[in-house]
Amino acid sequence: MRFPTFLTAPLIAALAFSSPAAMANPDVSDWDAVSQAAQGQTVYWHAWGGSTATNDFIAWIGERAEQQGVRLEHVKLSDTADAVGAVLTELQAGRETGGSVDLIWINGANFASMKSVGLLFGPFAEQLPNWQYVDVDGKTVTSDFTVPTEGYESPWAMAQLVFVYDSARVPEPPKNAARLLQWAQENPGRFTYPQPPDFLGTTFLKQMLIELVPDPAVLQNPVDEDYEDVTAILWDYLDQLTPYLWRQGRAYPETGPRQLQLINDGETDIAFSFSPGEATTAIANFDLPETVRTYVLDGGTLGNASFVAIPFNSSSKEGAMVVANILLSPEAQLRAQTPGILGYGTVLDMDRIPEADRAAFEALDLGIATLSPAELGQALPEPHPSWATRLADDWVARYGVAE
């Protein structure tokens, strides 16, 4: 799954000096009143727009919202920080009502920053009618990169990092950091990763650091004065890897889809995705060869939930809650998990949903390139969001390219 990128350092600094005033908000405990007030509202959902499959899914959600009297407009983003910046700009201009952003696909440092200074409406998530179906015990849906959500964002998809490879060219894919480096040295130019601060590129940095650092538990705490000592092993690893990357590290794919396109074009052999079903979906859409498969590393891979949040000054809070509730419906979750549509993992507990919906989930054919939950194994927890910000900034300083 392609997740939003994180808030940039200048915006984080600006947020620290701003705070919205308290204002009247809808009674989230009265769903009938929420539904009634939502009638006729237009919800501007600011969400990543770099995938046709994702855009089509959001359009489908819009059709369901229309049936409930809410118009959904997808504002396509390349960077979630753009939406966060819009909210910040409105706050600084004193626009505490009638905001232009009603819903954001968000997680990680963006969420932590907005929540810490009161830029989010809520709590609302646990009052949504479909929250009753959410797997709050088995999925990471009540914390976001170690930050408690406390009802200020609602989950709608689960993701776990999987490595994607063309089995016709790579009979035995490398399943740890040391073997990946060795493989790259033996196969120069056949591996790359998206350029940080792209979310997926930064995820690769975190994944490698978790494996390389002696005690990964340190990454659960905010970055502090031992950052240089902790990350030295990562930069040494990347110094060795970079000359053997695609184009010798002088250029990088901008996004995850572009990284997969390189496999389809025959330029590289190994990539990765945050959606375990993305490769199967891409094969079905003729965007990847039929010989592509996926795998996880021996020590496990990072996993997290994708969320939506409502800005404090949204002009359609009730409509945004209706959309968030639709995203949690068994119908929408089933559609999102269908390989030919998105292939996302569900946030629902199969024991809580109606029997007919459970049967539909059980009947899903996950596809030839999708690992089963048992094969995926236990997902590794995300580091504190401050690590993503610092790692991306340092990567740009060390390896960043303009191409």
Image (tube, helix red, strand yellow):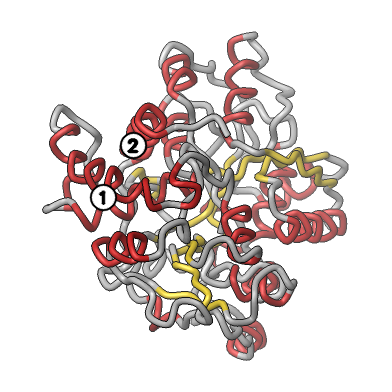
Crowdedness near tag 1: few (<14), some (14–19) or many (≥20) residues, C-alpha within 10 Å: many
Q: Are marks 2 and 1 in contact (CB under 8 Å)?
A: yes
Residue drawn at the location 67% of the way across and 44% of the way down = 47
Per the image, the residue denoted by label 2 is 391
Q: Is residue 133 visible?
A: no
Tag 2 secondary structure? helix
Q: Is residue 204 visible?
A: yes
Per the image, the residue denoted by label 1 is 209
Q: Residue furthest top?
A: 93
How far apart in space, not on screen, are marks 2 and 1 (Cα)? 10 Å
In this view, the residue in front, 29 or 223, is 223
* Relative horizontal placement of residue 171, taking residue 119 as reference (left or right): left
Indicate the amino acid at tag 1. Leu
Indicate the amino acid at tag 2. Leu
Crowdedness near tag 2: few (<14), some (14–19) or many (≥20) residues, C-alpha within 10 Å: many
Percent position of residue 73, x then y: 81, 43
In this view, the residue in front, 41 or 280, is 280
